Image (tube, grey):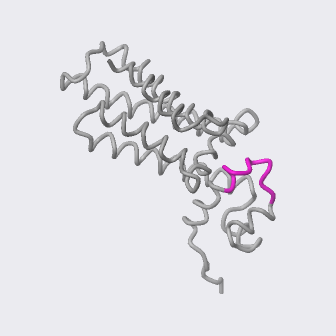
Amino acid sequence: MARAKEFDTEQVLRKATSVFGAYGYEGTSLSILLKELGIARQSLYDTYGTKHDLFVSALKFYVQQKTEASVLLLERSTSVREGIQHLFDEAVNVLTDPHRRNECFIINSAVEQAPQQHEIASFIQTNNRWMENILYTALLRGCAAGELQFQEQELRRISRFLNYTRLSLTYAAKSGATEEELRELVLTTLMVLD
């Protein structure tokens, strides 16, 4: 009879995003993973498979959580402009928080892996289109409400620009940008909505 798991699989995925974010995929050894996750080697293999499988699972878990949170934030905002501002502000808040920032850095590790890993590249592309559509829908709502003044064909370009700029904040933070510099990037980015 199989033993029941003695750990929370979702919590392990959260920890894995932070570990891979801190050390990168290549820099994360099996011994680091096991120590940081607090699980046995066999439990890792039985539940997640290889290190690569765990990385992909952690990446998908992280991105899905963040994208779903973005949807809720934008849908609940009374002002589209405020919602997008809040989305960017929250990204900066996370990236400047020493306890939460490593989770975001898993994106850098994924981008490094994408050229060699079709599954990761495909997932990133799919998620980028999903996030662009989320932003596009919000911008359409803002135009319909008279809050924004854009032609519909402009909205696709703007949503893509906003999404890639949001992603670039992670690179900037990992490269040493200060909180002030990140907030300046956000202010400049949001000028596109004026």
Quadrant, the N terminus: bottom right
Q: Residue furthest bottom?
A: 1
Dominant SS of magenta comes to helix
Residue at image position (38%, 20%) is 191
Which picture quadrant has residue 154?
top left
Question: Looking at the image, is 141 positioned above or below residue 92?
Answer: above
Considering depth in this image, is 180 or 73 the residue closer to the camera? Answer: 180
Total residue callouts: 0
Q: Position of residue 104 (x, y in %)?
A: 58, 46
Question: Looking at the image, is 25 positioned above or below residue 193?
Answer: below
Q: Position of residue 131 (x, y in %)?
A: 45, 35
Question: Looking at the image, is 7 positioned above or below residue 161?
Answer: below
The region drawn magenta spans 19-29
148 relative to 22 in the view: left or right: left
Question: Looking at the image, is 98 positioned above or below residue 177?
Answer: below
Considering depth in this image, is 24 or 92 the residue closer to the camera? Answer: 92
Residue at image position (32%, 39%) is 74
Considering depth in this image, is 6 or 26 the residue closer to the camera? Answer: 26
Indicate yes or no whether the magenta region holds residue 24: yes
Indicate yes or no whether the magenta region holds residue 33: no
Residue at image position (31%, 31%) is 138
